[in-house]
Amino acid sequence: MLLLSCIVLAQAQHEHHKPANNTGKQQDTSVHFYTGVEDMQMDVPMSHAFSLNLPMNRNGSGTGWLPDASPMYGYMLHSKNWMYMIHGNLFLRYTNQDIGSKGSRGDQKFDAPNWFMLMAQRKVGARGLFHYNVMVSLDPLTEGGAGYPLLFQSGESWKGQPLVDRQHPHDLFSELSVSYSYAFSKKVDAFAYFGYPGEPALGSVAFMHRPSALANPDAPVSHHWNDGTHITFGVATLGVRVDKFKLEGSLFTGREPDENRYNFDKMRFDSWSGRLSFNPSRNWAFQVSHGYVKSPEALHPGEDVNRTTASAIFSLPMRNDNWMNVTTLWGLNKTPGHEGENAFLLEGAWQMKKAAVYTRYEWVQKSVEELDLDPAKYGDALFPVNALTAGVSYDLLNIAKTRLALGGQLSVFFDDKSLHDLYGKNPLALQVYLRIYPGLMKM
């Protein structure tokens, strides 16, 4: 949060020392907290990141869309010409991925998954909009290089070995992006986006930014079937919106972040993707996308992935600050020699004024390679993994627009019987946590 605050204050200090206007009076360019529409008497774009004609609630991750009815949690600040939004999520938790000690692959840990994000934008002329994102994560410190325990998770590596049954940490700099959009009319916009790192137009809104997943500390087991490219070192995206539809395409680096989570990886621009988004009403956001990902895994440099995804996100605001948020998605990875591995996810959250109840169901086809199994014993089989999670959290404190919640969740994994010698039959995972996050913004 210190880094984000410094960026905001540095921008405000820069504006504060601009020359006086032609009336001889110094412009009021200091930063103020936003408390309501009535406070906004300045030329500040209270809009979506890539359109002056869409609500900011539609902001997802990268250039992805959420429903217009989505809740927003964060802090808003503004100066004379700039609007700032600060978001974040921090879990102080204990997780045990095999509470019955049924297998040999579960682990336990005290840790603190986290991310923090600054968004800033200003108008350029009457129809232009400039926007930048800064997203950081202290996962390299709190999770270590091997990340946190998560049964049946796979993807990336640590010390030259594949990460299996663990979720990799996110990079310190998870997004540094800039964009420019232009409004041809109220129904037509075009935009350009560049990130180093950033997120290409592939998959749904990343799990860290979906309202249906905000209270769940874990990444989905299907992460690398849908939103595994959300931290990509080198992304260039062009897009156009026509009324309720958006079509966009990206060139990006296929290789996933390396084991050094503090550096900036080489830009390659060897992969591509395209995405069609459709928001038919304020409650729904749909997308379909396809991409060619060049050599994503460092341990398998000759293995390219063709990924296809589809998703639907639903958001329903109710009385007394209650919200119902649901996401369903499907992802398909095709690699050389494989017909394709599927993943399905359905997650939902009922956010009440102080409490939240949430759940997630996943069905993922994991290969021998994904689970780092001996091919001499298991051949080229695909293992269906079913994972069901249920959790609850309750806000203990709400101070200075910041909430502290106590929560816990239980997960059960329904694994193939041929894996029982490694995982046991239907292993259980338990975690308890304290969550620190911004309060609900009321527009």
Image (cartoon, rainbow, N blue to C red):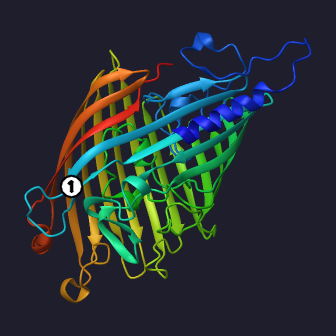
Q: Is residue 243 visible?
A: no
Position of residue 392 relative to residue 366, above or below, is: above
Task: Please state the horizontal and vertical placement of residue 84, each as a whole percent of the image.
Answer: 61, 30
State the residue at coordinates (58%, 35%). 5
Kindly identify which residue carries mark 1.
Answer: 387
Q: Nearer the viewer, residue 259 or 58?
A: 259
> Splitting the image into 4 quarters, where does residue 222 fall?
bottom left
Q: Nearer the viewer, residue 167 or 66?
A: 167
Residue 440 % position (x, y): 42, 24
Task: Residue at 27%, 73% (x, y): give it.
Answer: 371
Q: Is residue 47 left or right of residue 319?
A: right
What residue is drawn where x is 40% and y is 43%? 312
Query: Disc 1 marks which amino acid?
Result: Ala
Crowding at mark 1 (Cα within 10 Å: few <14, some 14-19, many 20+): many
* 432 is higher (above) or lower (below) than 319: below
- Residue 269: x and y in percent read 64, 67
